Image (cartoon, rainbow, N blue to C red):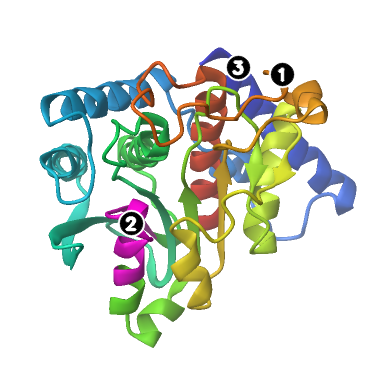
Amino acid sequence: MKLLVSGRALAAGAVAVATLMAGGAVAGAAPASESAAAAVAPDIPIANVKAHLSQFQSIAAANGGNRAHGRAGYQASLDYVKAKLDAAGFTTTVQRFTTSGRTGYNLIADWPGGDTSKVVMAGSHLDSVTSGAGINDNGSGSAAVLETALAVARSGYQPTKHLRFAWWGAEELGLVGSRYYVGSLTSTERAKISGYLNFDMIGSPNPGYFVYDDDPVIEQTFKDYFAGLGVSTEIETEGDGRSDHAPFKNAGVPVGGLFSGADYRKTSAQAAKWGGTVGQPFDPCYHTSCDTTANINDTALNRNSDAVAYAVWKLSE
């Protein structure tokens, strides 16, 4: 990926320069080249992320036009993601719950190794609304988290902390799946989660670049990445508390995440720094049947997918 390979290098370079300016080498520390190599995540191929989106679109088309809770399209989406993770060497768990008279499922995938008393989680909701395939909301987040997990496996990454990935059911009905998961944890298990990263709508066609302002360390990690690309960010307010980070935050887990906008309209100031169309929603197809593979901005999906990997690597090293 042309833009993000250079963006990754810029981000790594910015961090390296800042470290040197802050005081140079530290006695007993690893050589600079070794430290830089450890900190840099692999580039996430947008072609792979879009291939997952195409699969979600095909699944919806074959199952009544959606991937909603309790419907065949959701089950097929979960089966698709689980098969990819199982083949890559993850330990997967399907968690079952019931809401609105239908059975729902969360998918949890643990990467073997790392300190299980310090867990870094990345998650997204896998369900769509009943009116459409939900490719931006939230195939985009689901596909980026999946491809980041597969990149962990391809690279053989062995971080200090333990990595866990999650795909939530019934988010569109009130964060049901993530609430169920957090509620099923003991206080000891919750305390082991050092951070939860949430990705809900990251490929909006008229995109903004919004960063959750919850945990300051996670927030700064994302801001550093985008600063390396020369992309300005804003604090995320439209979806605050309306996605799957909320149950974790309410339970005292540090949270953060990314968002490219839903039905709020882009201002002239935002268009000046991000491009796009003034006065139009960030996602004109939000919760409608036109949320298909045509409803994705490749640049936003590209940048945000790499930001997912950057944060997963950085926060788990």
Q: Which residue is mark 2?
A: 173
Query: Are dots 1 and 3 in contact, CB under 8 Å?
Result: no
Precedes in sequence: disc 1 or disc 3? 3
Which residue: 51% across, 38% down? 41
Q: Which residue is mark 3?
A: 3
Which residue: 36% across, 30% down? 135
Q: Residues within 10 Å of mark 2 (few under 14, many from 20)?
A: some
Report the disc number at residue 82: none
Counting from the top left corner in percent of width and height, residue 244 is at 43, 58
Closest to the camera, between mark 2 and mark 3, is: 2
Query: Are dots 2 and 3 in contact, CB under 8 Å?
Result: no
Cα separation between marks 1 and 3 = 16 Å
- The three-letter code of the residue at mark 2 reads Leu
Query: Are dots 2 and 1 in contact, CB under 8 Å?
Result: no
Magenta segment boundaries in residue numbering:
163-180
Closest to the camera, between mark 1 and mark 3, is: 1
Precedes in sequence: disc 2 or disc 3? 3
Judge from the rendering whether residue 101 lies leftward or rightward of residue 229; answer left or right: left
Does residue 48 appear in the picture of this structure?
yes
Judge from the rendering whether residue 10 lies leftward or rightward of residue 48; answer left or right: right
**Camera-side residue: 50 or 26?**
50
Instruction: For mark 3, give the secondary structure.
Output: helix
**Camera-side residue: 191 or 12?**
191
Which residue: 23% across, 44% down? 68
Counting from the top left corner in percent of width and height, residue 265 is at 66, 32
Q: Which residue is mark 1?
A: 275
Cα separation between marks 2 and 3 = 37 Å
- The three-letter code of the residue at mark 3 reads Leu
In reply to whether residue 165 is colored magenta, the answer given is yes
